[in-house]
Image (tube, helix red, strand yellow):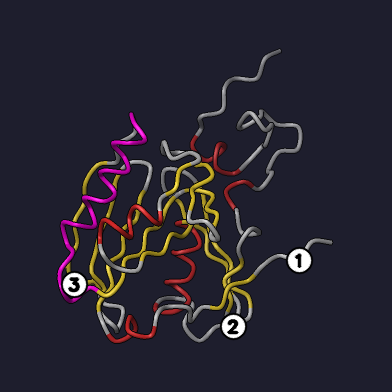
Amino acid sequence: MVATPRVGVAYLPPNVTEKRVLGVDVGGTKILAGIVDPTGKVEHRRERPTELDSQDRLIEEIGAAAEELLDDSVAAVGFGLPSRIDQQTGRVDGSVNVPLQNVALRDPLTKRVGRPVTLENDGNAAALAEYRAGAGRGARTMVMLTLGTGVGGGVVIDGKLLRDGGELGHTVLIYDGVPASARGLRDADRQSRGRHPARAP
């Protein structure tokens, strides 16, 4: 049995908890950015369409979305991505709905915005936000399901974010169903979007 890593909820740099932070949520259709104060209130928002034709252009748009709101009150920037992220290296290993594949992202974004940068799977980020400031406040354990361009979600157990085990959008729904990807998964994400091809006779 392989142990699944959990990440403690309170992992922000000490100076961040008393200042504003900037969050950028990258989705399959739009990029949302907002400045959040220490109480969890979103003070400013911006929205732009997601660039889907080019990885380089998408990365440029992600950086521009952060820069549009960045000011001296912002202590750190967090990016929620619909992606598999290597937290040790700050690389995006792969994505389903956006063209981000095998690319280093944390270091270039840190250099660009001049602030500490965190990358997180968007479902995990949403679950953590609900746990700390939303419907999950006061709970020790919670599960969140996100419904957007695809299906995602996150799991918090005993106050810790579960990574590498909360890919709820890739849960097999139909054992002998139509493959959702080259890996042959029959998953919730593809079924929910209705993009699976007609099954061959």
**Circle 2 sits in a helix, a strand or a loop, which is it?**
loop
Going from N to C along the chain, the mark reached first, 2 or 3, is: 3
Q: Residues within 10 Å of mark 1 (few under 14, many from 20)?
A: few
**Which residue, given by chain and number where applicable, does mark 1 sit on?**
3
* Closest to the observer, 163 or 176: 163
Going from N to C along the chain, the mark reached first, 1 or 2, is: 1
**Circle 1 sits in a helix, a strand or a loop, which is it?**
loop
**Which residue, given by chain and number where applicable, does mark 3 sit on?**
43
When the figure is inspected, residue 169 is found, relative to residue 22, above or below; the finding is above
**Which residue, given by chain and number where applicable, does mark 2 sit on?**
140
Residue extent of the magenta highlight:
53-74
Please name the residue shown 19% across and 62% down the image.
45
Q: Amino acid at mark 3?
A: Glu
Going from N to C along the chain, the mark reached first, 1 or 3, is: 1
Q: Main secondary structure of the magenta part?
A: helix
Question: Residue 115 location in percent, x, y?
Answer: 29, 68
Please name the residue shown 45% across and 51% down the image.
147
Please name the residue shown 63% across and 81% down the image.
158
Question: Residue 121 location in percent, x, y?
Answer: 48, 56
